[in-house]
Image (cartoon, rainbow, N blue to C red):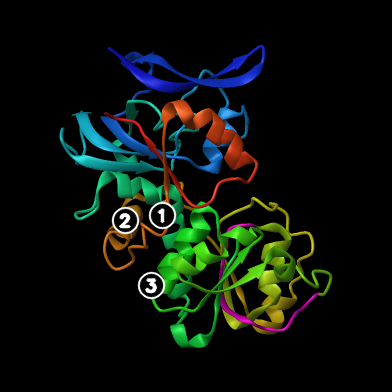
Amino acid sequence: MTFKALITENTDNGYQSRVGERELSDLPEGEVLVKVAWSSLNYKDALSASGNKGVTRQYPHTPGIDAVGVVEEAEQGPFSPGDAVICTGYDLGMNTAGGYGDYIRVPADWLVPLPDGMDPRSAMVLGTAGLTAALCVEALLDTGLQEDQGDVLVTGATGGVGCVAVSILSRLGFRVVAVTGKSDAHDWLKNLGAADIISREDALADANKPMLKPRWAGVVDCVGGDMLVNALKTLQYGASAACCGLVGSPQLNNATVLPFILRGVNLLGVDSVELPREVKQQIWQLLASDWTPDLAALEAAEITREQLPEWFERILAGGVRGRVVVKVGG
């Protein structure tokens, strides 16, 4: 049986992506075959589509680290044909054919049920980015963060994780300060719930100093590098930063132990890829109920698979704001 998929190939003109046909037999082994309805665009998808061997080792390949759809076949496990499911993380879209195909075949442990009250498109407006944002918020709440302790900083606030984090935190009653270098995004971020906005330059000021005046009750950092280092220097006593990104840099070149031993701050690592299914399911339930961000305010762009190559270029160049959903199924 053939089906349509976005296929990235290594050609004489470099890595190129096109919509073509694949066979079900091309898909890897797995207990569950899922007919995909929606996917989304993530920075990692663009890296895979541009030949980044740190993400995808072998080509031709179908990217797409997110997928939502309906179970077609299930050999074993908790799912049956007709079940609506979400797949994020693990190896999907990296070295396993991903959500930009009409079908994916994956282990049952990679899937969670689509929560009651959440439609498939909304699930992909959130996607891996929304899941990661919610995990960051949960990590901060687990340390005891409360609304009356002060402002919460969100770096990289116009990105997929950042904008969802702004919305969730605002909904939970926190006063959120968003960091962005995009002056045209201020009104959008305030509509999402940001109480104040600071520039990247302000957030990076005095980066050469080992400590800075305490300011933040908590931080969701989607950037890494000097941005995260400065955030650590400006945390209040005993406060925490949840770290989930490295778009700025994976290095903490200007960091010292001083914020940790003088103010007792915490650096919390957040992973949404290898997370146990049970935890993912709990977070998706929160996103479908008490923690539902303002999906309309996220202004998710809706595109087709044919449009993905140009959007890969956009997101790699930093030209994408918020979330992008990809219509896959008919």
Q: Position of residue 46 (x, y in %)?
A: 56, 35
Does residue 110 show up?
A: yes
Q: Say above or below: 319 vs 37.
A: below
In the displayed orientation, state which residue is furthest to the right. Answer: 208
In the displayed orientation, state which residue is furthest to the bottom. Answer: 148
Q: Is residue 218 magenta?
A: yes
Q: Position of residue 43 (x, y in %)?
A: 55, 42
Q: Which residues are magenta?
A: 210-223
Question: Which of the two labelled residues, at mark 2 and mark 3, occupies the earlier sequence position?
Answer: 3
Question: Which of the two labelled residues, at mark 2 and mark 1, occupies the earlier sequence position?
Answer: 1
Residue linked to disc 2: 284
Does residue 72 appear left or right of residue 124 in this picture?
A: left
Please give the label number shown on residue 171. Answer: 3
Residue at 61% of width from left, 21% of height from top? 15
Q: Disc 2 to disc 1, how far (Cα)?
A: 7 Å
Report helix, strand or loop for mark 3.
helix
Question: Which of the two labelled residues, at mark 3 and mark 1, occupies the earlier sequence position?
Answer: 1
Q: Disc 3 to disc 1, how far (Cα)?
A: 16 Å
- 10 Å crowding of disc 3: few (<14), some (14-19), many (20+): some
Residue at 43% of width from left, 73% of height from top? 170
Residue at 62% of width from left, 66% of height from top? 179
Q: Amino acid at mark 2?
A: Trp
CB within 8 Å, label 2 to label 1: yes
Q: Say above or below: 12 vs 245.
A: above
Q: Amino acid at mark 3?
A: Arg
Please give the label number shown on residue 51. Answer: none
Q: Amino acid at mark 1?
A: Leu
Q: Position of residue 165 (x, y in %)?
A: 47, 63
- Residue 105 position by quadrant: top left
Residue linked to disc 1: 131
